[in-house]
Amino acid sequence: MALNVTDLRVYYRTLRGEVKALDGVTFSVADGEIMGLAGESGSGKSTLAKSLIRLDGRMRHAGGTVELDGREMPLSDDRGMDRFRFREVSLIPQYSMSALNPTRKIGKMVGELLESRGERPDRAELERRLELVGLSGDVLDRYPIELSGGMKQRVVMVVSTLLNPSLLIADEVTSALDVSSQKAVATTLLGFRDRGLVTSMMVVTHDIALVYQIADTIMVMYAGRLAEKAPADVLVTAPRHPYTAQLISALPEVGVRHEDRRLTGIPGSPPSLLKPPEGCRFRDRCPLAFDRCAEQPPFAEVAPGHFVACWKAE
Amino acid sequence: MRRYFGRKLLIYGLTFFVAVTINWMIPRFMPGDPVQSMLSRANVAQPAAVEAMRAHYTAMFGFDLPLWQQYLNFWGSLLKGDLGISIWLFPTPVSDVIIRAVPYTLGLLIPSILLSWFAGNRFGAFAARRKWLDNTVLPVGYVLTATPYMWLAILLAWALGIVAGVFPVAGAYGFDLRPSLSWEFLGSLAQHWFLPFASLFLVAFGGWAIGMRNMIIYELEADYVDYLRALGAPARLVRRYAFRNAILPQVTGLALQLGVLVAGALVTEIVFSYPGLGHLILQAIQNQDFFLLQGTFLFIVIGVLIANFVIDIAYVLVDPRTRTGMGGAA
């Protein structure tokens, strides 16, 4: 098991109290698994991604443990986490376009970063990795402004995976791209795993259609909790959680004329996470809700590899 | 690269021409007649002698020629390095008067500008990371920067010079001394230099520190810093990058401040009766000394232009983004 997350809670400190953005999530990611992490904004997916690598100043690790390759990660200890960062767990950020220091040549910056982590920069290896994503070695002698947005993104992908991390977190990496670049990025991510440069991967996105193409499994979050995790094709074709089902039916399908069949949305909006309601958080918007939903349903395995947090799923 | 500097030099040349022309015009549009004031200073009673002297002085300074001729002659002699003769210190050539004053102004300005810039940036970057410093020392910086300069200077002169009696408040050296290379003279020079220097330093220091603190905080919030931290880069590397990027606007600020500080030194030199260029400007205006005023302004214009040119070059060295911009096709 590459990654084991147990009852992880991460809260945001605000003036009005703590926002329970991540409220007890338990799941694991296997070696070699590419897991898509989907959900609407505010569902806690980015919070989950961030807390696995670096909590920012407003976030508080309120409980739960994270184990990577059998070693527990000290989430709230910024110094202690440095041992894991880059080597064990690495990040491709949402903001690849501005992730590189504008006043340093790329090669020099990478060299300084590696040296500061006690690694020896290896230019030949760096150039080989750049070639894998279709860049020539001379981008190392350029400044970030001399590169196009797509080139910068590929440079960042190479830098992030340079030390062959065990877990790679890709945070909304395709959100700002056009469809052809999205496809290229998705293929590159797949390539990293297939060549063994990274062991497993968590791809955070709100685009289920895209993540479906590369992910082995997809996990859906809702209001700070897990709704469902299943192999990608199972989740898309036979979702068990009513939220997942509605989310998938809200996606347009190729070949369907929407004059005939209108796309359905999900009525209502997610609850406030400042004082989240008891029981199932989807209850108010759920067409299947019944009395028992006042009690929080467990994230239970209903079929091999298929976990659902819903009383009606069994 | 050559095109970039060629263009820059052209702009500087044009600025120089316009500035010098305006310098020539300003004294001539001032009310009053310098020859008249020289005559009254000479205190001659006979009307015939007065008339003869007036004719002599007018011809000597070239005031009998039409204005356009005066203007051309001015450029002609300027290019030969001749700035004319001072009216206030007649018959000393203007260039001699300026050369005597320049060491005092430069000795005051260069250390105070550069030291306050250097120390202010260091301190601001340091304060950005220490909450207690941020809350205690920086407010003092705000007060210093907001204080009208001459008020601060007078306050310093009063407190340290008159009440405490530690420093002298006027002149560049003791009135009983003649310039020489003795320890006594140098000591007196340093003692007289300290107060004007400290007043200039303090005011500029606060401004630089505040600017740098804000820039560092902004840089530490930038995406590239977040990325470096996510990859476990040590704080030392992050701080080095942030400092280097935050210093860029401060370099521009230094260039802008250089021009302003020449005017700032004018007030300093007046408050502390320091015999530099600012002091000369005041005397030249009071005595309607056209040539001296032109000469000092010319010196200031050249100073500001050179400072800006140096900063332009420095910018090319520290910020790669200007380098790619000037190549034309990158």
Image (cartoon, coloured by chain):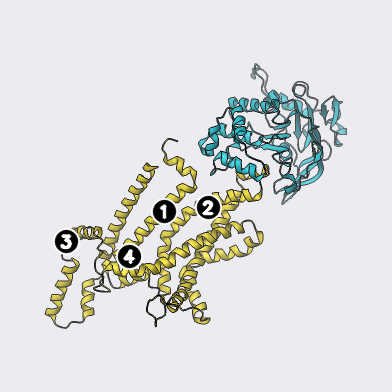
Chain colours: A cyan, B yellow
Q: Report the quarter where the N terminus of chain B lies.
A: top left
* Label 3 Cα crowd, 10 Å radius (few <14 / some 14-19 / many 20+): few
**Can residue A37 be spotted in the picture?**
no
Q: Please tell me the numbered disc located at residue B310.
A: 1
Query: What whole-number distance in Å separates the C-alpha atoms at marks 2 and 4?
Result: 32 Å
Identified by mark 4, the residue type is Thr
Is B151 displayed left or right of B229 in the figure? left
Q: CA distance from mark 4 to mark 1?
A: 21 Å
- Above-or-below relation of B242 to A216: below
Query: Which comes sooner in the sequence, label 4 or label 1?
Result: 4
Q: Amino acid at mark 2?
A: Ile
Q: Is residue B141 visible?
A: yes
Can you identify the residue that label 4 sits on?
B296
Q: Earlier in the sequence, mark 2 or mark 3?
A: 3
Counting residues from the start of the chain, the first of labels 2 and 4 encountered is: 2
* Marks 4, 1 in one chain: yes
Residue B54, given in percent of the width and then of the height, sits at: 16, 74
Q: Earlier in the sequence, mark 1 or mark 3?
A: 3
